[in-house]
Each structure stands twice: as C-alpha cells, then as structure tokens.
Image (cartoon, helix red, strand yellow):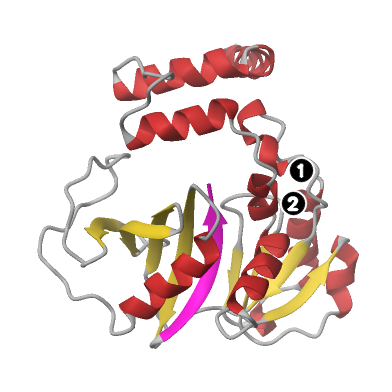
Amino acid sequence: MATRLRENREGLRILLWRAFPRAMLLTRYIHRFRQVPNLWRPRGFTEHLLVRMLFDRDPRLALFADKLTARAYAKARLGGEEHLPTLYAVVDAADEIRNLALPDRFVMKPNHMSGAYRIVRDATSVQRAELEALAASWLHRSYGVAPYEWAYRGIRPRVLFEELLEHNGVLPIDYNIHCFDGEPRFVRVWRGKFGPEITVITYDTDFRQIPTWLVPSSLRRVREESDPPPNFDRMLEIARKLSEGSDYVRVDLYNVGGRVVFGELTN
C-alpha cells in the first residue's frame, strides 16, 4: 500500500512538472529559498539563474550539455587538446564495448546525462558484460524529459571512455570558475567530491574566501585559508577563453599535478 502511494505521488509530480513546468520550478525556488523571486528585475545570483532556467533557450546550452560537443568546443577555443583529458573511445551501442581496446584505468560516462559515471582503476577486475549492461541502461534513458532539462533533448546518446584524472592515487580538486561576460568573477572549489566528506569553499579571483550559503547540509565549509594552485592564473586565462561571448557560464577545470584539464561547461 505504501509503495503504491509513493508511486502515485511520484507519477502525479511528473505530470505536474510536464503540465506546469514554470509554475513548478517557481514553487520549488520559493520553497527552497523562502522568498518570492523578482523575475522582472533579478538581483541575486540565484534569481538570475532562475530567470535563465525559465526563459533562456540559447542553443549554446544544448551544445554545452552534450559532453562530446562541449569537448569539441573547448578544443576549438583552446587551439588543441593539450588541456583535454585523453579520449580513448566513443560507442553508440553497448555491445561495441566487448571488443574495445581500453587501458587499465579509465572513466566511463554517458554524453547525454548529468552526474553519471563509472571509475575503473583495474580493467582486469571488471567484466565487460557489466560495463555493457551499465552502458545499455544509460543509452536507453531519455534524459531531458523534464521541461527544465530541455537542453538535453535531442542529444544523440553515446558512451565515452576517458582518461582517469588522478594525482598520486587521489582524484583532483574540482574548480568551478563562474564567468560573466567572459570574465571570471568567483571560484567554487570542491575537495573530496566523490568521497565520504565533501568540502566546498568559494573564492574571489584573488583567492580570498567569500562567505556563501551551502546546500545541502552534507557539505562542509572550511574556514582556514589555503593557497591557490601555482598555475591559478593559467586556469583563469583558460576560463576566459572558454567563456568569451557568453553572458554567464561556469567553467569546470581540474589541476592534476600542475596540468590544467578541462571538465565541462555549465550555464
């Protein structure tokens, strides 16, 4: 009975999102931030993002949503693949994985979804059938059904295999550089993003901490100061190149032993 009730509630929620996407998004914003946003004259960062989600249909959002077209965009903007993770393979169908020549360590991810990935540190310990089953589940998923995820619609689903970015066996720090009109304004730094304890700190471009409100509560703010990476200026330069011509875009970069590597673009 309880299971059926949950299923009915979830079905009703999906129907409401599809029928009234803007109203539902607005309701979620009010519930989360406990305030009514000013859609005509947005002031805060979250209000500007809400207006973009409600009304902005810039086709570049779809370009950035596809991990493969975003990679091609970054390659063109940066003049080569120096700052891109090595791409080992791309497949259209799960059964193509069976005969792929892959290195011992890699990351597997779909190009048309957000937050989905599989880290493999020892290819000999993983059955190809297991990877095929995971790829099939990704390829058959229609991401972008929700109206607020419109940018994912129309992306041709594929699965890519990329270099596993690690330094001394540790996953790198994730630098989210928020750029406005092609200029970096602040940086959100994630440590331990895929571990049991996540910390996040927001800095200005001089690497001074900025107080921010953290959600969800599982995130931990670190108050002690830390030094910027040695090539932080280079990271800002790359962010400028990738964000040029966009009123707002978040450029995600990694710093792997002094090597700056492109992650993704989000706006």
| Label of residue 26 in the image | none
Is 258 one of the magenta-colored residues? no
Q: Real-space Cα distance between discs 2 and 1?
A: 5 Å
The residue depicted at 68 percent of the width and 84 percent of the height is 124
The answer to which quarter of the image holds residue 254 is bottom left
Q: From the viewer's perspective, is residue 3 above or below residue 168?
A: above
The amino acid pointed to by label 2 is: Trp
Asked if residue 96 can be seen in this view, the reply is yes
Q: Position of residue 174 (x, y in %)?
A: 40, 66
| SS assignment at label 1 | loop
Q: From the viewer's perspective, is residue 216 above or below residue 98?
A: above
The amino acid pointed to by label 1 is: Arg
| SS assignment at label 2 | helix
The residue depicted at 79 percent of the width and 70 percent of the height is 90
Q: State the residue position of label 1.
A: 141
- How many numbered marks appear? 2
Task: Name the dominant secondary structure of the magenta segment.
Answer: strand
Q: State the residue position of label 2.
A: 138
The residue depicted at 56 percent of the width and 25 percent of the height is 54
Front-lying residue, 175 or 207: 207
Magenta-drawn segment: 259-267
Asked if residue 172 can be seen in this view, the reply is no
The answer to which quarter of the image holds residue 229 is bottom left
Which quarter shows the N terminus?
top right
Front-lying residue, 26 or 180: 180
Q: Is residue 168 left or right of residue 19?
A: left
Count residues near mark 2 (Cα–Cα under 10 Å), then give few for <14, some for 14-19, many for 20+.
Answer: many
Q: From the viewer's perspective, is residue 162 above or below residue 176?
A: below
Asked if the residue under mark 1 is in contact with the one under mark 2, i.e. CB atoms within 8 Å, the reply is yes
The residue depicted at 76 percent of the width and 63 percent of the height is 159
Q: From the viewer's perspective, is residue 34 above or below residue 161?
A: above
Is 265 one of the magenta-colored residues? yes
